Image: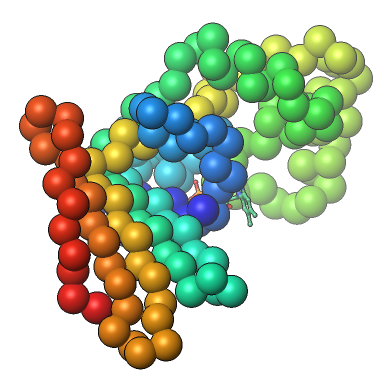
């Protein structure tokens, strides 16, 4: 899914992340809290998610507040990841500049030798969950009068369903 965040200066940026979990609370992805998106979310905890299926002519837009997932959830997912991914999480300071690829590979090798199969989860690695307050479904139609159905959460926690013009 595409994840859009906004910096403290009001500048938006977007990138793809893996939707790892979807439940009644919201949508969860995992990342480095010290990355660009982590910095943005630390200053402005609102974000937008976007899904697009070309073949189905469908788009889903989601907006809401973002919170960090629990330490227990972070540990559970981190420990379920392949070993190379866990080593990589320790080796990479996501979004920071590095002079060349060799340095990165050397760091990963060092971490692999140091920790083997017992890789500690870096405190700066974990999940975020977006708690949606707006979800809009767009369905393309051959008539060009496409469908847009928007759900907006009200203060009681219920959802208002409205049709928008295409
Ligand atoms: C298919 C795909 C899946 C990705 N999944 C993730 C992910 O789950 N978590 C993550 O941190 N980055 C993921 N990335 C990398 C991000 O797009 C991005 O490069 C990285 O998170 C740094 O973004 P930032 O500098 O804006 O924080 C993925 C990229 C692609 C293309």
- Residue drawn at 29 percent across, 40 percent down: 132
> Residue 48: x and y, percent?
34, 51
Residue 51 falls left or right of residue 97:
left
- Image quarter hosting the C terminus: bottom left
Residue 78 horizontal side relative to residue 100, left or right? left
Locate residue 146, reporting x and y percent.
32, 78
- The answer to whether residue 12 is above or below residue 95 is below
Indicate how the structure is coloured in the image: rainbow
Position of residue 90 measured from the top left corner of the image (x, y, whole percent): 70, 26
Q: Is 61 situated left or right of 65 in this image? A: right
On the question of residue 159 being in view, the answer is yes
Residue sitting at x 86%, y 14%: 117
Q: Nearer the viewer, residue 164 or 39?
A: 164
Expressed as whole percent of the image width and height from the top left, the position of residue 27 reads: 44, 37
Note whether 142 is above or below 57 in the view shown: below
Could you tell me which residue is drawn at 66 percent across and 21 percent down?
A: 78
The foreground one among 5 and 161 is: 161
Give the answer, above or below, for where 34 lies relative to 7. Answer: above
Q: Which of the 4 image quarters holds residue 120? A: top right
Task: Looking at the picture, tell me which residue is in the foreground, 84 or 102.
Answer: 84
């Amino acid at each position: 899914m595409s994840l859009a965040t906004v910096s403290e200066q009001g500048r938006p940026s977007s990138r793809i992340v893996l939707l790892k979990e979807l439940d009644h609370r919201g949508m969860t992805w995992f990342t480095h809290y010290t990355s660009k998106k982590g910095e943005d979310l630390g200053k402005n905890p609102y974000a937008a998610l976007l899904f697009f299926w070309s073949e189905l002519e469908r788009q889903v837009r989601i907006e809401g507040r973002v919170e960090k997932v629990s330490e227990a959830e972070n540990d559970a997912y981190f420990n379920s990841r392949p070993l190379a991914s866990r080593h990589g999480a320790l080796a990479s300071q996501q979004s920071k500049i590095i002079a060349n690829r060799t340095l990165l590979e050397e760091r990963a090798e060092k971490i692999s030798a140091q920790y083997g199969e017992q890789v500690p989860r870096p405190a700066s690695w974990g999940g975020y969950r977006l708690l949606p307050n707006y979800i809009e479904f767009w369905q393309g139609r051959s008539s060009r009068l496409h469908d847009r159905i928007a759900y907006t959460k009200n203060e009681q926690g219920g959802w208002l369903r409205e049709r928008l013009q295409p």
